[in-house]
Image: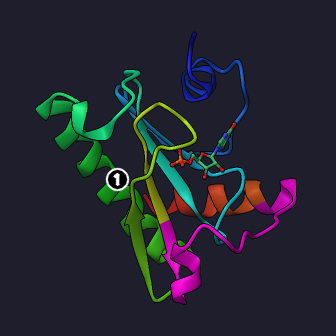
Amino acid sequence: MASIFTKIISGEIPCYKVAETEDYLAFLDINPNAKGHTLCIPKKEIDKLFDLDESSYHGLMEFSRKVAVAIEKAVPCKRVGMTVIGLEVPHAHVHLIPLNTMEDAQFINKTTLDKDEFQSIAATIASQL
Ligand code: 5GP
């Protein structure tokens, strides 16, 4: 069965898109640790990040770096953190999280955003790419 992220890639499930290339997609996490929390994924559906072939892995890292630089310009924060977990969605992804405190990295305190805020922050990050 297709992963929820594959359904996002195909458009079956909507997302707040930040960036897209032929092989990669970045979109806002629906349950963010902090405003601007973004997921970067390969379009190829592989469960574990370190099972990606070398070229896809490096491609995802290069794509994630560009998105992280744009997040740092768009979202007031001390820095952008990168985390890989994958316990919830079995489709390789990188979390890029604007950090101001250690709690922002901890996946415990979540931030609630309405549709307009999601749309606005996705557009602001995209404008910095
Ligand atoms: P992980 O697999 O790394 O533990 O967590 C998966 C992440 O994907 C979570 O932070 C969760 O909020 C996010 N997520 C799960 N389902 C969706 C979805 O349908 N849309 C979006 N944008 N994010 C999702």
Q: Is residue 76 visible?
A: no
- Which residue appears at 41% of the width and 21% of the height? 45
Q: Amino acid at mark 1?
A: Ser
Q: Magenta segment: does it hold 111?
A: yes
Q: Secondary structure at mark 1?
A: helix
On screen, residue 24 above or below 2? below
How many circles with numbers are drawn on the protein? Answer: 1
Q: Magenta segment: does it hold 28?
A: no
- Which residue appears at 48% of the width and 31% of the height? 90
Q: Nearer the viewer, residue 4 or 23?
A: 4
On screen, residue 45 above or below 93? above
Residue that sits furthest to the top in the current view: 1
Q: Position of residue 84 (x, y in %)?
A: 39, 54
Give the residue number, with chain letter if any, for mark 1: 64
Q: Is residue 118 left or right of residue 84?
A: right
Which picture quadrant has residue 81? bottom left
Q: Is residue 46 visible?
A: yes
Q: Position of residue 12 (x, y in %)?
A: 70, 18
Q: Is residue 33 left or right of residue 99?
A: right
Q: Nearer the viewer, residue 107 or 112?
A: 107
Q: Is residue 115 left or right of residue 50?
A: right
> Dot 1, crowdedness within 10 Å: few (<14), some or many (≥20)?
many
Q: Quadrant of ligand 1?
A: top right
Which picture quadrant has residue 68? bottom left
Residue that sits furthest to the left in the current view: 54
- Which residue appears at 71% of the width and 50% of the height? 30
Q: Nearer the viewer, residue 86 or 20?
A: 86
Quadrant assignment for the N terminus? top right
Q: Position of residue 61 (x, y in %)?
A: 25, 50
Q: Bounds of the magenta span? A: 97-117
